[in-house]
Image (cartoon, coloured by chain):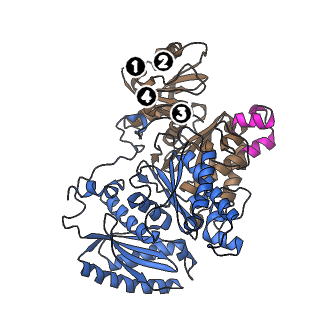
Amino acid sequence: MNQAVGGSSAPIGGAPASGPWQVADFPTPDTPLLTQAGDEVSLAVEIDGSRNALALVRPDGQVVDTVNVEPVETVPQLWERLEESLEVAGRRMARHSVRAVCSGVSIGSGAGELAGASSADLFREAEALVGHSVDAPVFVDDVGRGFTLAERWVGAVEGLDNFAAIYLGHRVSGGIVLNGRLLDGALGHAGRVGHLIVNPEGRRCRCGGKGCLDTEASVGAIEGRTGRVLSEPSYDLMHQVGRMVGRAAASLANLLDLKVVVCGGPVAREYASTLFNAAQSEMDTACQMAFSRGARFTSAKSPEPAGALGAAAIGWHGFVRRHGHTGFDGLTHPGAATGER
Amino acid sequence: MDAVLGLDLGGTKFAGALVDADGAVHAREQVAVDHDVDAEGVWRQLVGLISDVLGNPEAEPFTVLACGVGSAGPIAPNVEWVSPLNLAAWREFPLRSRLSDELEMLVVGDLDTKALAVGEGWKGAARGRANYLAMVVSTGIGGGIVLNGRLLEGASGNAGHIGHIIVSPDGHTCACGAAGCLEAEASGTAIANITGAPATEANQVVMERTGRIVGRGVASVMNLLELDLAVVGGSVALGFGQPFFDAAQAELETLCRFPGDVLQPTIVPAGLGDAAPLVGAAAVAWGALGRLG
């Protein structure tokens, strides 16, 4: 079908629209978000089942301190250990003379593997528990969307207004930023890139569908079908996974008018350049629209662990939105956010 | 009574009408585009069409507040220029400024498929919905996506191009150059290429295959963006009718699953019928006036 060409993301009609169809704009902060003291942090809570951690993270991405959470096997154990660690985090904040003005919780797919876990309960109970321990608003989201925000905040796509992110973890997740906004969707989890259909003749997916990217490129799927750990791949496997991820990335670029797809997570890290080269080659073949030609498949840059920084990003993003700012720009460019302190 | 002038500009025909604030269409006119003329010749055809609309007795009671355009692409944002693919005489034709000079009123516009999405959300099958995909399956395949009440734009205004998601990795070569795009498998052009007969002569098997393929593409987009409604217009989809929609719905139910089944994906025909492009163009103008309701 035909395409639009050009630069700006004008509202429909380019006029100062005021109806529900208006495209997001980026108001500069008109209310002070942060104090002069610069002592605010986001209390980041990463929940991923086997690996759980807390971190205190400033608005510029600097990690003030981290608190490990003891390994757990069940959901009740998780809440018990987390509560203990939140107490430790409180003491660390006092020691560092910082205070949490927001908290972000990243729920990774590993959390779903704990005995007794259900996704909705994890989100709800994590919010309640953390909210009980910290006098600040708590924002909970999944690891892929946190990864997306972190990459825009301090990663490979810092400050970019249009991109998709793919996180190849125990499951495949991700997020989409379009015209400066993280897309939410009806349930608040838009950007479910793991359920793009990349292999119509492929395997049944855990979601109930078939041929989803998750069945081709998640840690769980790869280890399940090869019977080997992720760190022992064949060249053909790495290449094949890369092609599937690239196919999904190409569909994203063509569908959503994107020039960049950023990819990270354990599979991306292990398969490295073989995966990235195969994915880029697939994108080069399939991105043929004028607006998508030359789209890049690029490696994540935000420091590991992605979950902790993603959790901090979830917190700051929610904080900025809560104060009426529609984008994440203020924190992507700290000067803009803090200039009116 | 207030109305806006809606213009639907395709490669083969131009259509125009007044559309009132309730979405009712008045003084509808259209003209087959003469391709044997230069850019100014095409412009004169458009001006003639506008004169016909405004001179139509049905137009008399109305005060025309603005003009909304839905154009085949490529276009620049807000139809600053248009280069409809199948209208060679217009290449980067400065449509918005020419219309603005001619009409002396606010002129706004967008891609025809995005305008359709706005129109279907205003008065069509997606009325009152905050999350949906609107798409056209005709000679080509395109669409527009509304998420959390906002029409997705993208960096250059092209978000919603569902015709170029990959649905059949080892499939047919697309006009864009890639292989296996939805447009290469299920558009009218693709059906003619694959079957050797125009889509108007398609049998039940072809109609159902087309529905399944479209359903697969829609399922991917719904999974990605948490959508539960797809509104489909265009001559192929509407012409194929029930066999197409039944097959597409069955594919959605197989491929599109949300945790807890809280969303029930549905694919339905466009609600505005053949008036959808004009109402969509008008909706862009009503939106710019802040009166989409």
Tell me where the magenta segment starts and ends, as one range.
B187-210
Label pair 3/4, CB-CB below 8 angstroms: no
The image's mark for residue B80 is: 4
A24 shown above or below B136? below
Whichever of callouts 3 and 1 sits on the residue coming sooner in the sequence is 1
Q: Quadrant of residue B179?
A: top right
Circles 1 and 4 on the same subunit: yes
Whichever of callouts 4 and 2 sits on the residue coming sooner in the sequence is 2
Q: Secondary structure at mark 1?
A: helix
Numbered disc in front, either 1 or 4: 4
**Residue type marked 1:** Leu
| Drawing shade for chain A | blue
Residue found 28% across the figure and 50% down from its top? A28
Q: Secondary structure at mark 4?
A: loop
Whichever of callouts 3 and 4 sits on the residue coming sooner in the sequence is 4
Give the CA distance from mark 3 to mark 4: 14 Å
Q: Quadrant of residue A235?
A: bottom right
Residue A149: percent from the left, percent from the top?
42, 60
**Residue type marked 4:** Glu
Residue under pointer 2: B50
Residue under pointer 3: B112
- Horizontal placement of B124 versus A98: left or right? right
